[in-house]
Amino acid sequence: MHRYLSASQYIDFDTPEVQAKARQLATQAASETELIRSSFEFVRDEIRHSSDFKLNPVTCKASDVLRHKTGYCYAKSHLLAALLRANGVPTGLCYQRLSVTGEGAPYCLHGLNAVYLKESGWYRIDPRGNKAGVNAQFQPPQEALAFPIGTPNERDLPEIWAEPLPLVVDTLARYDTYDQVLANLPDIELIA
């Protein structure tokens, strides 16, 4: 579990601002479950999704997401991982492959989290941000993710990563504005 509790370049909970926010969330929670819920709801509701709100800058590091209060799903998942890891909760990164239009190609990756719950194991949560047609919740043991898998080439990718996928980091680092990222969302090829 050590790798799901570690700080890193993008899950940088060793920075003062992430440490302070993690402590604030911890002091307001009476249990680990409450801490997970409040951290999830903070990132889901208080950090604005870059594309939904047409916001710059493009963020990737957890500390930048917190500082600018915006990020794509990938960056928001980095912040949630940082806040939970800072409080000793094992947290990983997960991805779905989704249709951009909901009707087939083109496809893109969508970033979310998995958190280790002592009573039931790994549980996926999606801090993307709710809007019309998107209603992600924290209601273990039932998952309530932002997007269901619908078309034949969409997938819930089974891995739980300790670090962001390099192609996600590359996309967020390469482009300067939210609309450039939106036009170049990362995707992977499915293996038959």
Image (cartoon, helix red, strand yellow):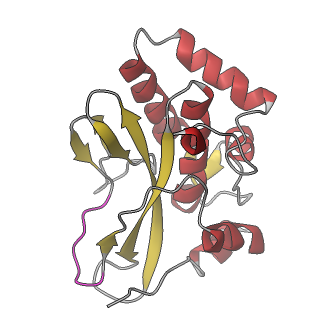
On screen, residue 27 versus residue 179, left or right, reads left
Q: Whole-percent x and y of residue 68?
A: 72, 44
Asked if residue 72 shows in the view, the reply is no
On screen, residue 45 versus residue 33, left or right, reads right
Main SS of the magenta part reads loop
- Front-lying residue, 175 or 22: 22
On screen, residue 94 versus residue 143, left or right, reads right
- Write the start and end of the magenta stretch as one range: 147-153
Who's the residue at 39% across and 73% down the image?
A: 97
Quadrant the C terminus occupies: bottom left
In which quarter of the view is residue 50 placed? Answer: bottom right
Q: Whole-percent x and y of residue 167?
A: 63, 74
Asked if residue 49 shows in the view, the reply is yes
List the single residue furthest toward the front. 2
On screen, residue 18 above or below 73: above
Q: Whole-percent x and y of residue 5?
A: 58, 37
Residue 37 colored in magenta in the image: no
Q: Whole-percent x and y of residue 2?
A: 58, 39
Q: How many marks?
A: 0
In which quarter of the view is residue 180 placed? Answer: bottom right
On screen, residue 139 above or below 51: above
On screen, residue 2 above or below 149: above
On screen, residue 156 versus residue 184, left or right, reads left
Who's the residue at 68% across and 66% down the image?
A: 169
Who's the residue at 50% across and 80% down the image?
A: 187
Residue 151 colored in magenta in the image: yes
In which quarter of the view is residue 137 placed? Answer: top left
Who's the residue at 45% across and 45% down the image?
A: 127
On screen, residue 88 above or below 47: above
